[in-house]
């Protein structure tokens, strides 16, 4: 999964930079999903997912 994501990143980055960015992205997505499912407040759950998505798109 990391390799697939890394391979789709801009060629302007060195391989190590792409791998690091891919690792951080997957870790953020997994963490956001776990947190969003762990809370009992639907709004907070949505906010966690939205904030993570917005941060990763930036």
Image: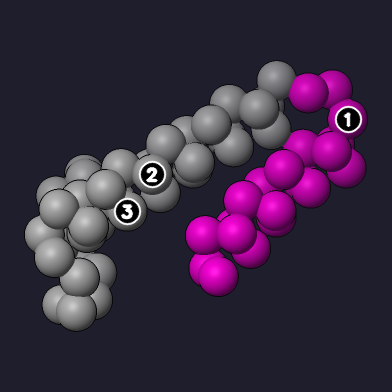
Number of numbered discs present? Answer: 3
**Quarter holding residue 33:** top right
Is most of the magenta stretch helix, strand or loop? helix
Please name whichever residue, 42 or 52, is drawn nearer the observer in this view of the structure. Answer: 52
- In the figure, is residue 50 to the left or right of 47? left
Give the secondary structure at mark 1.
loop
Q: Which mark is residue 21?
A: 3
Q: Quick check: 13 left or right of 26?
A: left
Identify the residue position indicated by label 1 in the image: 41
x then y, percent, for residue 27: 42, 36
Q: What mark, if any, has residue 24 been given in the picture? A: 2
Q: Quadrant of the C terminus?
A: bottom right
Which of the colour schemes (rainbow, by chain, secondary structure, one colour) is used? Answer: one colour
Q: Position of residue 35 (x, y in %)?
A: 66, 27
SS state under label 3:
helix
- The residue under the point 22% across, 59% down is 18
- Nearer the observer, 44 or 28: 28
Q: Could you tell me which residue is drawn at 47 percent across and 34 percent down? A: 30
Pointer 3 with pointer 2, Cβ within 8 A = yes
In the foreground, 28 or 45? 28
Say which label, 3 or 1, has the lower sequence index. Answer: 3
What's the distance in space between the residues labelled 1 and 2, CA to CA?
A: 26 Å
The quarter of the rendered structure image containing the N terminus is top left
Q: Position of residue 21 (x, y in %)?
A: 32, 53
Q: Residue at x 67, y 47 (%)?
A: 49
Which contiguous range is marked in magenta?
Answer: 39-58
Give how far across and how far down residue 37 sits, in percent.
Answer: 67, 27
Residue in front for this viewpoint, 16 or 7 = 16
Front disc: 1 or 2: 2
């Amino acid at each position: 999964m990391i390799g697939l994501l890394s391979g789709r990143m801009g060629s302007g980055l060195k391989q190590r930079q792409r791998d690091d960015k891919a690792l951080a992205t997957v870790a953020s997505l997994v963490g956001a999903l776990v947190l969003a499912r762990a809370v009992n407040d639907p709004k907070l759950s949505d906010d966690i997912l939205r904030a993570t998505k917005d941060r990763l798109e930036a």
